[in-house]
Image: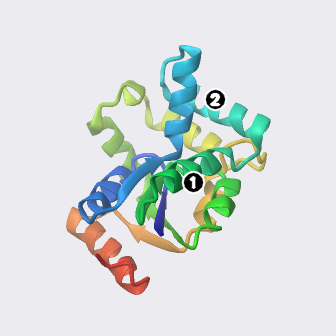
């Protein structure tokens, strides 16, 4: 099995990168889907603050790799040969995913001002009314954690095998992904 993990800060283009890989025959999984399922069970809205809170609770109760472990079980049950795994935000998740036979982690990078403009354009419910200052505060909360039960995005980014700059055109993003696929002999 070939598994490509995608990480990066909000608005960096992880979903766009995932869509491109889906076109190449990869099946998509998001660690956040586990959290969304839990929100549904609890009757909670799937807003960013709830997702963060529930994700942290699940990690605290079941260990830092719980989201990755549950996702790996789903993947293995379907016997898939090419998968993309997104929403990786904790170093324990990376450690668990790195146990897969062929796993690489790609960080999608974009400067904060460009990401902020992108989230304003995508018009998700959680993004409306967010100022640049609040966006930066949310990002800091998600990025700087040392608590193994919480988000540690900066640690995850440091663990990535590749960084792809997505501050330019879609073609530049796709070329960056293609270079990684070629280097890893993951071409399809």
Give residue 101's position: percent from left, percent from top: 57, 73
Q: Residue at the location (49% across, 74% down)?
A: 162
Q: Residue at the location (57% across, 54% down)?
A: 72
14 and 183: which is toward the camera:
183
Toward the top, the furthest residue is 43
Give residue 89's position: percent from left, percent from top: 59, 50
Residue 54 has which mark? Answer: 2
- Res. 89 in view: no
- Closer to viewer: mark 1 or mark 2: 1
Q: Is residue 2 left or right of residue 26?
A: right
Q: How far apart are marks 1 and 2 (CA)?
A: 19 Å
Height in image: 43 above or below 183?
above
Q: What element carries label 1?
A: helix
Which quarter of the rendering shows the C terminus? bottom left
1 and 2 marks in contact (CB < 8 Å)? no
Give residue 78's position: percent from left, percent from top: 45, 52
Q: Residue at the location (29% across, 63% down)?
A: 25
Give residue 157's position: percent from left, percent from top: 58, 62
Q: In this view, does 141 lie to the left or right of 135?
A: right
Q: In this view, does 102 lie to the left or right of 172?
A: right
* Display coloring: rainbow
Residue 72 has which mark? Answer: 1
The answer to which image quadrant residue 181 occupies is bottom left
11 and 30: which is toward the camera:
30
């Amino acid at each position: 099995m070939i598994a490509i993990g995608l990480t990066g800060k909000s608005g960096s283009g992880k979903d766009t990168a995932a869509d491109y890989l889906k076109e190449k025959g990869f099946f998509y999984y998001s660690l956040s889907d586990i959290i969304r399922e839990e929100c549904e069970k609890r009757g909670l809205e799937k807003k960013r603050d709830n997702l963060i809170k529930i994700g942290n609770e699940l990690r605290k109760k079941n260990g830092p790799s719980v989201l990755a472990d549950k996702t790996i079980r789903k993947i293995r049950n379907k016997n898939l040969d090419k998968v993309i795994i997104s929403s990786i935000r904790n170093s324990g998740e990376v450690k668990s995913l790195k146990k897969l036979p062929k796993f690489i982690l790609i960080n999608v990078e974009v400067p904060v001002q460009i990401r902020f403009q992108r989230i304003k354009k995508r018009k998700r419910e959680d993004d409306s009314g967010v100022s640049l200052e609040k966006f930066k505060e949310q990002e800091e909360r998600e990025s700087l954690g040392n608590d193994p039960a919480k988000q540690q995005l900066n640690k995850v980014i440091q663990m990535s095998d590749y960084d792809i700059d997505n501050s330019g055109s879609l073609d530049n993003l796709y070329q960056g992904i293609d270079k990684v696929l070629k280097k890893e002999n993951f071409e399809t």
